[in-house]
Amino acid sequence: MHSIYARVNGVSGLWSTCIMVLLAAVALSSFLFNADPKGNLDIVSLKVFHSKTRRYPYRNEEISFVKFNISTDFTPLFNWNTKQLFVYLEAEYTNAQGVNNTVILWDRIVRRKEQAKIDVVQKDKYRLRDLSGSFRDVLPAQYSLKYNVMPYVGVLSYGEAARTLEPIDFPEAKDSVS
Ligand SMILES: *[C@@H]1O[C@H](CO)[C@@H](O)[C@H](O)[C@H]1NC(C)=O
Ligand SMILES: *[C@@H]1O[C@H](CO)[C@@H](O)[C@H](O)[C@H]1NC(C)=O
């Protein structure tokens, strides 16, 4: 009785050691693939409008509309330890109060290698608003296309695929969308 128990215990200990070593090897192998895909990012147009929101009908809020063109091939990021990618377009700017903000304008989850070639020309998915309600005196913004790689085993990794060459000015707000 005693010896059977000890034996089962020994086998399952060996088994879990094997699994640990295997998982560590898979996680480490990801570092061998240091793919660093680079692509293109253009801000096609940037417009600012006054808008009266339903929540604050008496407050004149400004909203920016960003149209962009991104094209990047993320296929090299897919290996046997890639579960999925999170790809996103980010705006970075300093507002009139001197606060640095980063805002996500568009994102996509890529689950399969066949969907990893991304060519998108469209308007922002998430509206760009500033907490202060205005883009007056806001410094020109930088835009960047970034990604997270989520592995089956191991840690998340981050990267940047493209960035606008020059910061882009916010134009003066026009009337009016509501
Ligand atoms: C988007 O950018 C790519 C690469 O710079 C370019 O080839 C393509 O013509 C652009 N598309 C539009 C609609 O501007
Ligand atoms: C905002 O970003 C700029 C440029 O990256 C940096 O020099 C500055 O110190 C940042 N300001 C704050 C308040 O973090």
Image (tube, rainbow, N blue to C red):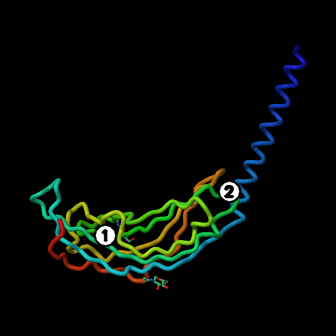
Q: Quadrant of residue 64?
A: bottom left
Disc 1 marks a residue whose amino acid type is Thr
Q: Is residue 6 above or below residue 52?
A: above
Q: Secondary structure at mark 2?
A: loop
Instruction: Determine the residue positioned at 24% across, 60% down.
Output: 131
Q: Is residue 31 above or below residue 12?
A: below
Q: Nearer the viewer, residue 142 or 150?
A: 150
Disc 2 marks a residue whose amino acid type is Asn
Cβ atoms at labels 2 and 1 below 8 Å apart = no
Would residue 61 appear left or right of 78 to someone viewing this image?
Answer: left
Q: Quadrant of residue 134?
A: bottom left
Q: Position of residue 101 (x, y in %)?
A: 34, 64
Q: Which mark is residue 81?
A: 2
Q: Position of residue 128 (x, y in %)?
A: 30, 66
Would residue 27 appear left or right of 132 to someone viewing this image?
Answer: right
Instruction: Determine the residue positioned at 68% across, 56% down.
Output: 81
Q: Nearer the viewer, residue 79 or 26?
A: 79
Q: Secondary structure at mark 1?
A: strand
Q: Residue furthest top?
A: 1
Q: How many marks?
A: 2
Q: Which residue carries the number 1 mark? A: 94
